[in-house]
């Protein structure tokens, strides 16, 4: 106790942070450490089973990794496609989540019900609902409803508004137009993926002391100035955390095309555990590099504001 009394508050917080990591490190060592090492061994071998011998390892060296970069075009295409999707999804997930969190942070009637509504995507994408979604049941239902609605509109000679035509008439550049159309096409995925990030950002907004806003109001700051000079800087660490969460969630989602390819290779007709393990390790390295680059860009830009409570 005397040792803790002599420590600074910053040092105590550092020790407390490391203590919070201990349960994770113990769980990783007990339940994940061995499988991780085993998968690395698999990636350098062809795995098969023989009667009387059990699991047989046949060393192939770096052949699996060489195949990934030389002949497996489908894996590379899926990997690049996934990275391009992040360019569209992650910024919009963060922006959409921040917008909804700011709205939900206001006092209005039915606010708690609205919070439940915006958290529903997290529940929908779990269990039975996830199976329905992955089997395209929900998608087919929505498409059928839209097609029926379109037929009804055509029958009544209703005007059909082409969003792309509207943007073109506004003389928006082609690159921006492509980005906007990609956002519209992926709006369902963006909403589905925003439940957790909305909750995190809402908690961040509620942690800001009301006295800060009262001081700004006394000084004559407008709502716009308050958002950009107070709200956004104070929640910027949480925005960064939500961006990292969105990237990891997108890379590891069960509907991810790369994950599907790895699972089909490992557990499909080929049962090629060695090659699937090599793909997994390459995928892990790509994710780690991606997160390192994003983290480095945020750190160098100094857009994240940390303050001591």
Image (tube, rainbow, N blue to C red):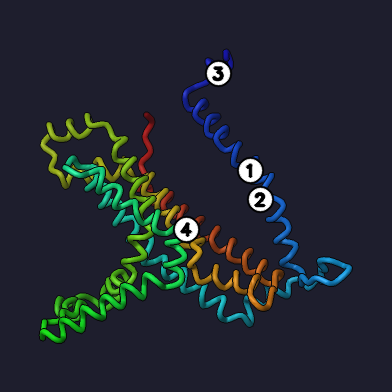
Residue 131 shown left or right of residue 162 in the figure:
right
Check disc 2 and report the residue beneath it.
32
What is the C-alpha distance between the residues marked 4 and 3? Answer: 46 Å
Q: Nearer the viewer, mark 4 or mark 2?
A: 4
Instruction: Say which quarter of the image contains residue 186.
Output: bottom left
The image quadrant where one finds the N terminus is top right
**Helix, strand or loop status at disc 4:** helix
Mark closer to the chain start, 2 or 1 = 1
The residue depicted at 27 percent of the width and 75 percent of the height is 145
Pinpoint residue 180: horizontal percent, then vertical percent: 27, 71
Q: Work out whether 209 lies above or below 146.
A: above
* Residue farthest toward the top in the current orientation of the protein: 2
The answer to whether mark 4 and mark 3 are in CB contact below 8 A is no
Q: Nearer the viewer, mark 4 or mark 3?
A: 4
**Helix, strand or loop status at disc 3:** helix
What is the C-alpha distance between the residues marked 4 and 2? Answer: 23 Å
**Helix, strand or loop status at disc 2:** helix
The residue depicted at 51 percent of the width and 78 percent of the height is 77
Q: Nearer the viewer, mark 3 or mark 2?
A: 2
What is the C-alpha distance between the residues marked 1 and 3? Answer: 27 Å
**Viewer-proximal residue among 31 and 225:** 31
Q: Which mark is residue 4?
A: 3
**Dot 2: within a 10 Å radius of its alpha carbon, few (fewer than 14), some, or many (20 or more) residues?**
few
Mark closer to the chain start, 4 or 1 = 1
Check disc 1 and report the residue beneath it.
27
Check disc 4 and report the residue beneath it.
127
Mark closer to the chain start, 1 or 3 = 3
Residue 127 shown left or right of residue 262 in the figure:
left
């Amino acid at each position: 106790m005397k040792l803790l009394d002599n420590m600074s508050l910053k040092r105590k917080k550092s020790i407390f942070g490391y203590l919070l990591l201990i349960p994770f490190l113990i769980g990783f060592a007990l339940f994940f450490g061995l499988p991780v090492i085993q998968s690395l061994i698999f990636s350098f071998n062809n795995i098969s089973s023989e009667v009387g011998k059990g699991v047989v390892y046949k060393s192939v060296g770096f052949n699996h990794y060489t195949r990934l970069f030389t002949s497996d075009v489908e894996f590379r295409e899926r990997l690049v496609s996934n990275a391009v999707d992040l360019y569209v999804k992650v910024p919009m997930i963060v922006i959409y989540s921040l917008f909804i969190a700011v709205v939900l942070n206001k006092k209005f009637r039915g606010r708690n019900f609205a919070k439940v509504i915006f958290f529903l995507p997290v529940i929908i994408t779990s269990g039975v609902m996830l199976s329905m979604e992955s089997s395209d049941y929900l998608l087919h239902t929505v498409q059928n409803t839209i097609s029926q609605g379109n037929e009804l509109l055509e029958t009544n000679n209703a005007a059909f508004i082409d969003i792309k035509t509207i943007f073109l008439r506004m003389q928006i550049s082609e690159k921006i137009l492509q980005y906007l159309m990609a956002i519209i096409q992926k709006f369902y995925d963006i909403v589905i993926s925003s439940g957790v990030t909305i909750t995190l950002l809402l908690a961040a907004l509620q942690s800001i002391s009301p006295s800060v806003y009262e001081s700004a109001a006394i000084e004559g700051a407008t709502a716009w100035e308050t958002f950009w000079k107070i709200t956004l800087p104070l929640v910027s660490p949480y925005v960064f955390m939500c961006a990292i969460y969105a990237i990891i969630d997108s890379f590891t989602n069960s509907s991810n095309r790369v994950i599907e390819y790895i699972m089909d290779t490992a557990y499909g007709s080929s049962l090629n555990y060695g090659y699937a393990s090599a793909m997994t390790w390459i995928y892990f390295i790509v994710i780690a590099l991606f997160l390192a680059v994003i983290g480095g860009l945020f750190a160098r830009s100094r857009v994240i504001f940390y303050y001591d409570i």
